[in-house]
Image (cartoon, helix red, strand yellow):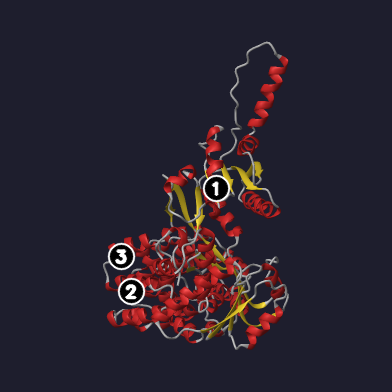
Amino acid sequence: MKLSTMRKAPLLLPLLFALLQACGSTTTVPEQSAPSFDPQDASIGELVRAANATDGLESAQLRILALEAMIASGDNEGATRQWTLLNNLEDYPETLQLRAALLEAQLALRNGQTAKAVSLLTETADTSFEDRPELLSEYLLVLGQAYQDDGQYELALASYLRLGETGTANAGVSLNVHNEIWDAITRFSPAQLDNFASTANSYQSRGWVELARVVSSEQYSIRSQLDAIRQWQRIWSQHPASQQLPQRLTKLELSWQQRPKHIALILPLQDSAGKAIQEGFLSAYYAALDISRDVPKISVFDSSNLSNVYPIYDAAVASGADLIIGPLYKQLVNQLQQLDELPVPTLALNYSDDSINLSNNLTQFGLAPEDEIEQAANLAWQAGYKNAAIITPQSSDYQRLQQAFANSWASKGGNLVSQSTFGGDTDYADVIKRLMAIDSSEARRDRIVDLLPRSRVEFTPRRRGDIDFIFLIANPREGRQIKPTLAFYFAGDIPVYALPSIYDGLDNPSVNQDLNGIVFTDAPWILTGYDPLKTNAASSLRPAQGPVQRFRAMGIDSFRLYARLQQFNDGDIATLPGATGILSMDENGRIHRRLEVARFIEGKATLEDRAGTASD
């Protein structure tokens, strides 16, 4: 959630006017005639004209009032112009100078100059505000905002907590502060939260830590979160947030009350993917039933072999469903997207070909390899690599993925310097020779031998030296042949990044030794034991390899999303931890996944770095 100065400034206008009046009563600058209007009731234009018609302290006071109003209304350009007209501030009372410094920082934030805002605020020591409680409150509020916009969430939280402990904020500002505290603390990783908890030495800060923990621990169920919040309120009854919860938590109750009561599930049940999604969906459903009897009615419609979505979709609507989950086939999702508006909210389980969502009430969620490619490219770029090579199977589908990687890498400023493809019965030696330009090296040797037929020519092939890393799209069987072949042709030291397809989801070190060193991303459901549903699913469902497990995870997430879609649409949550990854929604109603990162070490997929945490 991007913070906005605009929503804070209106609370401070009356404060500023009173403050400026106080400035006038203490200044040694000669008195000026009072304006013929009430500045609090004046328009921005009237304030600017009055400021232009006077000079000295009165002009500065009026111009600062105009600046405040412009920032509040979002007129950044006008505010910037007015700022340039504020001169000789050092000649005015310190209170006015401090107020101007706060406005300059707010203006920098509104113009996207986060680093400048942080610098302005930290250069103005907060000791200057200690004797001015009304300014100290605003200083801490804007400082917290600047740190938060800069991604320094621990410092932002410290500013907000200090503001809460000053006791100077009114009810409106208190709610705003609680909202910002919650936004900051829910961006902490588990390690950051534990570290903050170890240093929390006040009742208020410890209470916030415990609230974040209980809400996070029940992140898979709104009903459980609501119960946990009520229990927290009973224990922390004297905590400020107990009387005034952050807005996103108070809206949880509304989200729960307005959740869909009847879900129609449209799946191709004769396909392994459709069956796996249904298994995951029902596993999550029965887990929710164990928590509360307040679960939706489920109607299932089989879309196997359908080429026209409209009859089955109409039947799902006619069943009384107030949420439809499905279809799975891309062709059917494309048909739904052609409608201007769907009669009920719909969570499609694939993505349409058109990335711009033209249909109201349509959200799209799937296992898009484009998300996986983007994250792999980000990992390589963050590692400092510049020149990439890519190995993919031969087919039009894989050419599309190859192009997706090339586009992503180029957008970051990287170079794709080599590429090679393989078929079903490929000699991987030829694939690697082409990739590493060893075939060219061998051709040079042959030419030399032809020129010197009677001479003994000692020759060691040389690979190209400009490849920083290799991006690999392959299944486990293919990967087990490609990785050793790279080593054989002098490229064993080149880092390899791969898609989830490289891992079959089975813990088999003896078989996977040849994959050692490969970095890949995959769903939390595959790589971690975080999800409480995983143990139950493992005991109740048939054993399955990676592809089926990933579709089961998708089914689990599709159920858990049913009560969260409105929260995403309203901006009440930015991310949600899921079985398929950390979920987020873009402006086109497409849900994206951020995956876990792992590396093969001694034949085992070893978690290397957590992909993200919940944001409620």
Tell me residue 593's x, y (percent). 54, 63
Relative horizontal placement of residue 147, taking residue 393 as reference (left or right):
left
Q: Alpha carbon of mark 2 to alpha carbon of mark 1: how far? A: 63 Å
Q: Alpha carbon of mark 1 to alpha carbon of mark 3: how far? A: 46 Å
Dot 3 crowding, Cα within 10 Å, few <14, some 14–19, many 20+: some
**Nearer-the-camera pick, 598 or 244:** 598
Quadrant of residue 37 in the image? bottom right
Quadrant of residue 69 in the image? bottom right
Q: Alpha carbon of mark 3 to alpha carbon of mark 2: how far? A: 21 Å
Evaluate if marks 2 and 1 touch, with contact meaning CB atoms under 8 Å apart: no
Of badges 1 and 3, nearer the viewer stands 1
Type of residue at label 3?
Answer: Ala
Of badges 3 and 2, nearer the viewer stands 3
Type of residue at label 1?
Answer: Arg
Work out which residue is located at the far top of the displayed protein and give it.
454
Please name the residue shown 39% across and 75% down the image: 134
Disc 1: which residue: 477
Relative horizontal placement of residue 213, taking residue 264 as reference (left or right):
left
**Nearer-the-camera pick, 592 or 446:** 446
Mark drawn on residue 166: 2
Note whether 117 is above or below 571 in the view shown.
above
Mark drawn on residue 197: 3
Please name the residue shown 65% across and 42% down the image: 419
* Label 2 element class: helix
